[in-house]
Image: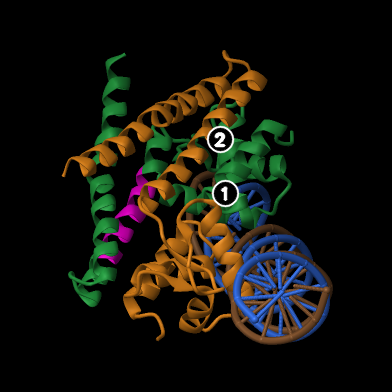
Chain colours: A green, B orange, C blue, D brown
Amino acid sequence: MALSGPAEKLALTLAEGGLQRMTARVLAALLFTDQETMTAGEIADTLAISSGSVSTAIKSLATVGLIERVPAPGSRREHFRLREGAWATLMSGQNAMIGSLREAAEEGITVAGAGSLAGARLAEMRDFYDYLWRELPALIDRWRDDKGDQ
Amino acid sequence: MALSGPAEKLALTLAEGGLQRMTARVLAALLFTDQETMTAGEIADTLAISSGSVSTAIKSLATVGLIERVPAPGSRREHFRLREGAWATLMSGQNAMIGSLREAAEEGITVAGAGSLAGARLAEMRDFYDYLWRELPALIDRWRDDKGDQ
DNA sequence: TGCAGTCTTCAGAAATCTTTGAAAGTTCGA
DNA sequence: TCGAACTTTCAAAGATTTCTGAAGACTGCA
């Protein structure tokens, strides 16, 4: 009932990537289960963590669109599953940070002056993140399209 | 002598992106200075942090290739500066994580079995990160090339 | 309306991560 | 080889983050 070694390892890697540890473990549980969906109680049992932690993790995963609640007729408990396209969603979240860095560089140029040494460094930074900001979403869209073609 | 508001803000954003806080501040100091290079002592003064913290931050920034030591004739102190292409380097670091996730998914498929529900989910994950693993470096190379053309 | 089952919230405990400061180490010039 | 000027290391203090557990809220049913 506990998570397998590879599942825990995957959770750890996701945690390095920025997710909270318990959030990452909940995601791993939903990824590795052989059921269609899991209830909060099942997740808590599998991971041996408190229901409070599960609740918090589910809330944050649902907010960013990685998992979804599944209507469960005949049960009062809520069922959850990994969402279609979750990984692309996770990557899009990274894109927000790229936008922040681009903006931070832009503000820096204003303060430092475009002609200064600092301004030149910041301009290089801004240009790079500007490029990613434009190209990364396009890259992800292309994956979605290719997948649709199959 | 302290960092400007935008500089601290940029440091904070970098910290969210995974850098330690002091490491991010050191990077911001080197980005915003109007000198060609800074010494460890200057960085410590600017940020009002201990020399130990500066040493640790410099070590980690140099290890991942974001900054470089600059030979300083006539001085025993070491000088540092942001490296050319630092931002592309930082992004390439992210790529390592994509590789880890791809590999974690692959291992998961082996354990769960390719035909299982879990195996199908893991295959979707693996395919996505495999795609990024191939395309992201190409995207970054394209930026390097375009920049060279100017 | 009352109840049983489930979920959420949140204060405090526990664990983890950061930073410091001082001692030890290194390097260069004489 | 010695000493001065820096740099690095690392144990411990301090700060921050994370998790739990229990109280309270919600939901659907009778």
Estimate the x, y position of residue A141 in percent, counting from the top left.
Answer: 27, 32
Give the class, few, some or many, for how many residues have Cα within 10 Å of label 1's Cα (few <14, many ≥20): some
Question: Which circle marks residue B100 in the picture?
Answer: 2
Q: Chain of mark 2?
A: B
Give me the residue at 64% from left, 21% from top: B112
Q: Which residue is mark 1?
A: A16
**Please, what is the three-letter code of the amino acid marked with disc 2?**
Ser
How far separated are the C-alphas under marks 1 and 2?
A: 10 Å
**Closer to us: A118 or A148:** A118
Q: In the visual, does A99 lie left or right of A85?
A: left
Estimate the x, y position of residue B114 in percent, counting from the top left.
Answer: 58, 15
Give me the residue at 53% from left, 56% from top: B62
**Please, what is the three-letter code of the amino acid marked with disc 1?**
Glu
Q: In the visual, does B91 lie left or right of A77?
A: left
In this rendering, is residue C4 above or below A149? Answer: below
Q: Chain of mark 1?
A: A
Estimate the x, y position of residue D7 in percent, counting from the top left.
Answer: 62, 70
Prevailing SS of the magenta stretch: helix
